[in-house]
Image (cartoon, coloured by chain):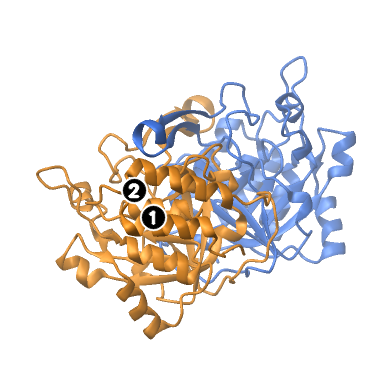
Chain colours: A orange, B blue
Amino acid sequence: MRDTCCMCTEECLQQSRAGRLSRRAALTGAAAAAAGLVAAAPAQASPAPAARLGSRLRDLTYPLTTTFPAFAPGEEAAKRTWVTIEDDGYYLQEWRLLEHYGTHVDAPGHFVPGGRTSTELRLDELVTPAVVVDVAARAARDPDTVVTVDDLRAHERRHGRIPRGAAVLMYSGWGARAGDAAAYRGADANGTLHFPGFGAEACEWLLRRRGIRSVGVDTLSIDPGRSTTFDAHLLLAGADRYGLENLANLGRVPPAGATVVVGLIPFQDGSGGQARVFATW
Amino acid sequence: MRDTCCMCTEECLQQSRAGRLSRRAALTGAAAAAAGLVAAAPAQASPAPAARLGSRLRDLTYPLTTTFPAFAPGEEAAKRTWVTIEDDGYYLQEWRLLEHYGTHVDAPGHFVPGGRTSTELRLDELVTPAVVVDVAARAARDPDTVVTVDDLRAHERRHGRIPRGAAVLMYSGWGARAGDAAAYRGADANGTLHFPGFGAEACEWLLRRRGIRSVGVDTLSIDPGRSTTFDAHLLLAGADRYGLENLANLGRVPPAGATVVVGLIPFQDGSGGQARVFATW
């Protein structure tokens, strides 16, 4: 596992903390960071995973439909019947998909020029320990809440240290709204979205102090809905890490001790893409 | 695990063996069989998997590109850049996909009216023991070769009994041709395809005698390329089982003792679809 925080990541984090960067400049800095972190390992390597499949298995994936809430209206998937058993002897559908619809991965290249794409994430990055940070009670009162460093420290006091290489998953209870796009997106009269996400400081802390592999959320974005600067995306991609969005059933995964299996479709030049995500413990 | 062969499956198998059914009639019979076998279990169940994640992990998935060989020319995926970091601050692609391109699952509904679709395959069906049957030496001499009952019995003599609920995977060495669509499809002057697959008798034997969960191949189809009757598809779908096609790296998976993890994207009404498939042992 290559979890060491390198100098360029540290530099990127410091720049972001200081708030001295425009979004475009942050992207450029993050690109430089990512460039130095791209793994040389082939996609077909056979590493030893850091965790093991247990006796419990839970699906963290929403069915891929044409009505699941999209980040922006119009980004929903579309499908049509291609052939039918009646006419052709077999049945299949054709899909039109954007890579960030439904349960999906954000690869580093989604936000970082030259960042790794879907085929470049290694298997040992897709099977990792998982922790679930529960902010559902606060999110029910405040849709703009974010995961904070205090939340992470409190989680560790109760459930033990967040493992190196972990997927850190926010459970906000937002899945209860997934059947209602307006409620899930939380757009106000100005079009600003409102749903929980990861705070920038929490991302920095997880990357620098815990050497995590990924963060995931049960909302449309690892950044809170109202974000205009996409700090969580930029920090994570800048550190050559990936995100998981629109995860289901996080309330049914233990706070610590699970393994997440991220079945990312290896899209050519993919900025991420649809994934079948399991948890096991 | 619901692996018991029910009466209607037995009837379907007998009809198919006797060769008394037209393809359409076989489909109808298979539909009836499937109807009685549709699982009532919800997709979000948490069953105990039959096998465990080991210390070795192998990717059985081809990158999803626009140039991978399609069963029929014109069925390749297409993609285009949707937004760019330069212009929009982030990058993503749009895809046009048929459900049976690249490494993918054939759900029962692909060939059976009313058969289960992608969202209806349970997690305990997607994580199963795996065995790999090696017919590569014969396939190198005869592209029309099929996996036979003799192959399966010989495999068991060397590697032990095929486990109930297993994925039975044919390794034919066809992956060496995956970079050359003409060689991978093996079309002759008449347009007939030539590549190895499962014989009908072997499928019957696996379903009836071993209660398997799935069969998989490193070719375009679980039926051999020259098939016009799609016996393997009909037998498997008729027994409410699924297929795996265009698997990579099967020559690097042990003949017995591995577990396969099938990360099928749960396409709405899906006849199957793209999957990230891992083996572990």
* Direction bottom: furthest residue: A158
Is residue B149 in view? yes
Q: Which residue is mark 1?
A: A15
Residue B266 relative to residue A230: left or right: right
Marks 1 and 2, how far apart in space?
7 Å
The disc placed on residue A21 is 2
Is residue A167 in view? no
Residue B253 relative to residue A210: left or right: right
User: Which amino acid, by three-letter code, is at mark 1?
Assistant: Gln
- Are the residues tagged 1 and 2 within 8 Å (C-beta)? yes
The residue lying at 77 percent from left, 27 percent from top is: B183
Mark 2 residue element = loop
- Residue B210 in the image: x percent, y percent? 70, 61
In the depicted structure, whether residue A77 falls above or below residue A187? above
Q: Mark 2, residues whose alpha carbon is within 10 Å: few (<14), some, or many (≥20)?
A: some
User: Which amino acid, by three-letter code, is at mark 2?
Assistant: Leu
